[in-house]
Image: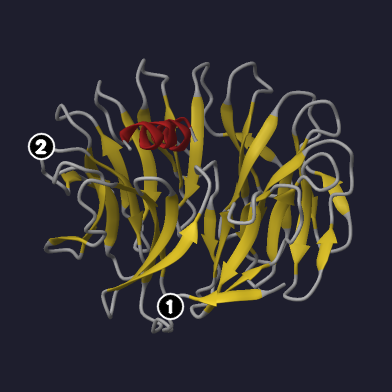
C-alpha cells in the first residue's frame, strides 16, 4: 500500500439525514482526539484515537484523500468525506453516531466548520462546485453560480471566504451571512484563503506573474513574499505572524513575516516544508537537512530537531496541550506517533499498513 500513500503525500506537500451506526458503541470522553487516515489491504478508512482512554474508533471507508478530507468542529464533531454510498458524501461523527448530512448522488467534499457550528462544503449537485452550508437541520446553497466555487474557510467572526471561477479566473469571494462580495477583484489567479485570528486574510495570488503570498486587513492588500519565486502554504500563528514556504533561495525554505519584515528561519540548502504553529507560537516544519525527513521546531531564537531519528518523520500537527502528532516510518511502515514533550508513542500500531494525515481536536 505504499503507492496510494505516495500519491497522498504528493497531494499534501505540493497541497470528506440519518444516523446510521454507532462507532464501537461507546462515546469518547472530552480529552484530545486525533483523526488520521489508515491505508488497509483493500480499503482506506478514517480512524480517531482518544488520548485519555487510548481507544481507537474506526469510522469506516473514505476515498483516496484530496485537499481537505476531514475537519473538526470547536465542540469535537468530525466532518469527513466518505464514498460508502457509492459517491462522495459529507458525514458528521458526534462521538456516538454518524450522520450523512449531504445526501445527494453528486459528489460533496471539502468540509469546513464555522466557530458557531455551521458546516460549509463543496457540492457538485448543481453541475459545478457550489458552496453549501448545513446549519444542523437544512442545507443552503450560498454561492449560486454556474461556475466552479470551492475551498471554503471561516473567519473567527463567521465570515466565509471561498474561491470562485465566475469571473473567468479564480477570485476570492466573501459571504457575510447575507451577501456575496468579490474580495480580490483582480484578473489573475487568487486562491487558497486562510484567516488569521485577528480577521486578516492571507491568500495566494499570481497577479505579479508568479505565485506570491498576500495579506489583506480589510482596507489594504500587502504582498508579503515580494520575490519572483514560488511562494505557497501560508499559515498564521496565534499572535499574528505568517509562515509560508518559498523557493526564492533555489530550494524550499520556511519564511516568516512578522507584519514588517521577512525572515528565512530554516536557512538550509535542503528542502524544508509543512510549516505548522503550536498554540504557544512555536513554528514546526519538516526538513531533509539530515539526509532524511525530520521535524524541526523554531522558538523564535533557535532550531531544534525534535524527532532525531534516521527514519522519515513528517506532517507535524500540534494540539492545544503541546503534544505533537506526526507520521513516521521508523518501524518500517508509515504510522502515527505522538510526542508528549518527553517521549514518543506509536498510537496507530498498524504494522504492514500505512497511516497518515493526523489532525487533532482539543477541548
The quarter in which the C terminus is drawn is bottom left
Quadrant including the N terminus = top left
Where is residue 257? Give x, y as percent.
46, 40
Figure quadrant of residue 24 = bottom left
Q: Which is more N-terminal, label 1 or label 2?
A: 2
Q: Which disc number belongs to residue 310?
A: 2
Q: Nearer the viewer, residue 52 or 282?
A: 52
- Mark 1: secondary structure: loop
Q: Which residue is more in the foreground, 126 or 83?
A: 83
Q: Residues within 10 Å of mark 1 (few under 14, many from 20)?
A: few
Q: Is residue 235 left or right of residue 141?
A: left
Assign a secondary structure to mark 2: loop
Q: Residues within 10 Å of mark 2 (few under 14, many from 20)?
A: few
Please say if 216 is above or below 292: below
Judged from this view, the residue extending furthest toward the front is 42
Give whichever of 280, 42 is nearer the camera: 42
Above/below status of 42 relative to 115:
above
Amino acid at each position: 500500500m505504499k503507492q496510494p500513500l505516495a500519491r497522498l503525500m504528493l497531494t499534501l506537500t505540493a497541497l470528506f439525514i440519518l444516523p446510521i451506526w454507532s462507532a464501537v458503541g461507546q462515546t469518547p470522553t472530552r480529552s484530545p482526539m486525533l483523526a488520521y487516515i489508515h491505508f488497509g489491504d483493500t480499503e482506506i478508512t478514517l480512524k480517531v484515537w482518544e488520548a485519555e482512554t487510548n481507544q481507537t474508533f474506526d469510522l469506516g471507508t473514505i476515498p483516496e484523500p484530496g485537499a481537505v478530507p476531514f475537519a473538526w468542529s470547536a465542540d469535537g464533531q468530525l466532518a469527513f468525506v466518505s464514498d460508502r454510498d457509492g459517491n462522495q458524501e459529507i458525514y458528521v461523527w458526534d462521538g456516538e453516531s454518524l450522520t450523512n448530512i449531504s445526501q445527494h448522488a453528486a459528489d460533496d467534499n471539502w468540509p469546513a466548520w464555522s466557530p458557531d457550528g455551521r458546516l460549509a462544503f463543496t457540492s457538485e449537485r448543481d453541475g459545478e462546485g457550489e458552496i453549501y452550508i448545513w446549519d444542523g437541520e437544512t442545507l443552503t446553497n450560498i454561492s449560486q453560480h454556474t461556475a466552479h466555487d470551492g475551498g471554503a474557510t471561516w473567519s473567527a467572526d463567521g465570515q466565509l471566504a471561498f474561491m470562485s471561477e465566475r469571473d473567468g479566473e479564480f477570485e476570492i469571494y466573501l459571504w457575510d451571512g447575507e451577501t456575496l462580495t468579490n474580495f480580490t477583484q483582480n484578473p489573475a489567479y487568487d486562491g487558497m484563503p486562510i484567516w488569521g485570528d485577528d480577521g486578516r486574510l492571507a491568500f495566494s495570488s499570481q497577479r505579479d506573474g508568479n505565485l506570491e503570498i498576500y495579506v489583506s486587513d480589510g482596507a489594504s492588500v500587502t504582498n508579503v513574499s515580494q520575490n519572483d519565486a514560488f511562494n505557497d502554504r501560508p499559515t498564521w500563528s496565534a499572535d499574528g505572524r505568517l509562515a509560508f514556504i518559498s523557493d526564492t533561495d533555489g530550494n524550499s525554505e520556511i519564511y516568516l513575516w512578522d507584519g514588517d519584515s521577512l525572515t528565512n528561519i530554516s536557512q538550509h540548502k535542503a528542502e524544508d516544508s509543512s510549516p505548522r504553529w503550536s498554540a504557544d507560537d512555536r513554528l514546526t516544519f519538516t526538513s531533509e537537512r539530515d539526509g532524511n525527513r525530520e521535524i524541526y521546531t523554531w522558538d523564535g531564537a533557535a532550531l531544534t530537531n525534535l524527532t532525531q531519528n534516521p527514519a522519515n518523520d513528517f506532517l507535524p500537527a500540534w494540539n492545544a496541550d503541546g503534544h505533537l502528532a506526526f507520521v513516521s516510518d521508523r518501524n518500517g511502515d508509515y504510522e502515527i506517533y505522538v510526542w508528549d514533550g518527553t517521549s514518543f508513542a506509536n498510537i496507530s500500531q498498524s504494522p504492514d499498513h500505512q497511516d497518515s494525515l493526523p489532525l487533532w481536536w482539543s477541548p
